[in-house]
Image (cartoon, rainbow, N blue to C red):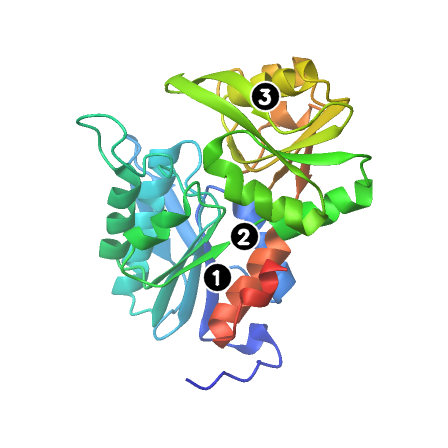
C-alpha cells in the first residue's frame, strides 16, 4: 500500500481524530499538542449506580480514530469506559478504530501458572476486539507474547528511548543495568545495550500475589552504580527488596526506572523510606497527589513517542525507527 502524503496540518484533516477516556486525559492532550490536532469532543457521565454513559459530540463517519485510555486504577472502570467508547465509535461508522493503551491492565495474568486460574489478558484482548477495535497500540507490555492474543494488528512500543536519554544525561559512574527477575532480562538487556553498560540479574521467587522474596544477585555489582529496569512498580515490595539485595552485595548506589507507576497500597511509603536514590517513571499512568510529593519519583513523558507512533499509523509509514 502506498504511503499517504503528510497533511499540511492535521487540524485540517477531518478524517483523523483522537479521543480520550477519563483514565489519563492529560496524556491525551499532550499527544494532541505534539501532533497538532484538537482532542475530540465527547460527553461522559455516570448514572447514580456508577453505570457509564458516553456520547460522541462530533462526526466520525469514515474517520481514522485513536482512543487513548490506559486501563489503570480503577482498572475495571477504565476498561469498561474503553469498551463503551469503542462501541460508540463503531456504531457511529468510524473508518478505523485504534485503541491506544499505554498501560494494559491484566497483563500480568498471561498464562496458567496455577491450576484453575483465568488467562485474563487474553480475555481482555477478546473484549477489545469484539467491541470493535481494528488496531491496538501498547507500551511496554508485561509480556511481549500478549501481542499474540489479538487477531488484529498490534504496535508494541517501548519507553526505553525516553529513559535511555535521561540516564545518559545523568552520566552515572560505573553503571550496571539490573533486571529484577528472569522475566525482565530481555527488557534490561536491550536497555544495557543502548546505554553501553553490563547486565546483572536478581533471582527472585514469588511466594504469593504481590509478595516476593529476593534470593541472590547474578553478576558483579560491587562498587558499582546499579540501575534497576522494570515495566511495572505496583506495591514496590520487589523493588525495595531488590535495592536492599544490591546494596548488600556492595553496590554504591541504586537507581530504578519503570514504565508504569501503578503504585498501589504501601508503595509510595516504601519508596520514600527506601535507600533508592531515584525512581524514574513515565506518564503512562497519572501519578497520585501523594506520589507527586515524593522527591525520589521523577516523571518522563512518553507523549511525544506515542504521538509519533500515532502519526506513523495514520500515515501508514514505518514506526520501527522510533525504537531508536
Task: Identify which residue is drawn at 50% across, 37% down.
Answer: 184
> Badges 1 and 3: C-beta atoms under 8 Å apart?
no
The one of 87 and 72 positioned closer to us in this rendering: 72
CA separation in Å, label 2 and label 1 = 8 Å
Q: Position of residue 193 (x, y in %)?
A: 65, 49
Q: Position of residue 139 (x, y in %)?
A: 49, 49
Task: Identify which residue is drawn at 24% across, 50% down.
Answer: 126
The one of 108 and 297 positioned closer to us in this rendering: 108
**Residue corresponding to mark 2:** 28
**Residue corresponding to mark 1:** 18
Residue 296 visible at all: no
CA separation in Å, label 1 and label 3 = 40 Å
Lower sequence index among marks 1 and 3: 1
The vertical placement of 67 against 189, above or below, is below
**Residue corresponding to mark 3:** 242
Picture quarter containing residue 80? top left
Lower sequence index among marks 2 and 3: 2
Tell me: 2 left or right of 180: left
Which-is-in-front pick, marks 1 and 3? 3
Tell me: 58 left or right of 88: right
Task: Identify which residue is drawn at 79% across, 34% down.
Answer: 174
Secondary structure under badge 3? helix
Query: In the rendered view of the protein, which quadrant contains the C terminus?
Result: bottom right
> Badges 2 and 1: C-beta atoms under 8 Å apart?
yes
The vertical placement of 153 against 171, above or below, is below
Dot 1 surroundings within 10 Å: few (below 14), some, or many (20 or more)?
many
Lower sequence index among marks 2 and 1: 1
CA separation in Å, label 2 and label 3 = 33 Å
Tell me: 55 left or right of 6: left
Q: Position of residue 314 (x, y in %)?
A: 48, 72
Residue 240 visible at all: yes
Picture quarter containing residue 63? bottom left
Amino acid at each position: 500500500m502506498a504511503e499517504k502524503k503528510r497533511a499540511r496540518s492535521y487540524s485540517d484533516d477531518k478524517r483523523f481524530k483522537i479521543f480520550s477516556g477519563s483514565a489519563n486525559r492529560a496524556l491525551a492532550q499532550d499527544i494532541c499538542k505534539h501532533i497538532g490536532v484538537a482532542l475530540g469532543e465527547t460527553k461522559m457521565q455516570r448514572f447514580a449506580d456508577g453505570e457509564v454513559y458516553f456520547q460522541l459530540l462530533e462526526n466520525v463517519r469514515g474517520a481514522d480514530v485513536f482512543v487513548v485510555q490506559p486501563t489503570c486504577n480503577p482498572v475495571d472502570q477504565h476498561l469498561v469506559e474503553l469498551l463503551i467508547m469503542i462501541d460508540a465509535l463503531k456504531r457511529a461508522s468510524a473508518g478505523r478504530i485504534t485503541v491506544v493503551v499505554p498501560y494494559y491492565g491484566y497483563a500480568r495474568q498471561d498464562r496458567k501458572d496455577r491450576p484453575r486460574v483465568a488467562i485474563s489478558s487474553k480475555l481482555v484482548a477478546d473484549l477489545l476486539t469484539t467491541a470493535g477495535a481494528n488496531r491496538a497500540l501498547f507500551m511496554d507490555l508485561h509480556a511481549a507474547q500478549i501481542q499474540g492474543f489479538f487477531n488484529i494488528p498490534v504496535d508494541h512500543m517501548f519507553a526505553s528511548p525516553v529513559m535511555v536519554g535521561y540516564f545518559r544525561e545523568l552520566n552515572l559512574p560505573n553503571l550496571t543495568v539490573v533486571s529484577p527477575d528472569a522475566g525482565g532480562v530481555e527488557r534490561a538487556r536491550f536497555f544495557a545495550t543502548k546505554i553501553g553498560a553490563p547486565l546483572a540479574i536478581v533471582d527472585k521467587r514469588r511466594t504469593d500475589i504481590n509478595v516476593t522474596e529476593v534470593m541472590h544477585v547474578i553478576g558483579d555489582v560491587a562498587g558499582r552504580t546499579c540501575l534497576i529496569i522494570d515495566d511495572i512498580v505496583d506495591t514496590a515490595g520487589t523493588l525495595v527488596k531488590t535495592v536492599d539485595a544490591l546494596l548488600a552485595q556492595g553496590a554504591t548506589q541504586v537507581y530504578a526506572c519503570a514504565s508504569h507507576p501503578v503504585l498501589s497500597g504501601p508503595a509510595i511509603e516504601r519508596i520514600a523510606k527506601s535507600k533508592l536514590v531515584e525512581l524514574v517513571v513515565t506518564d503512562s499512568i497519572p501519578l497520585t497527589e501523594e506520589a507527586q510529593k515524593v522527591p525520589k519519583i521523577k516523571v518522563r513523558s512518553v507523549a511525544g513517542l506515542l504521538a509519533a507512533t500515532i502519526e506513523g499509523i495514520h500515515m501508514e509509514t514505518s514506526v520501527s525507527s522510533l525504537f531508536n
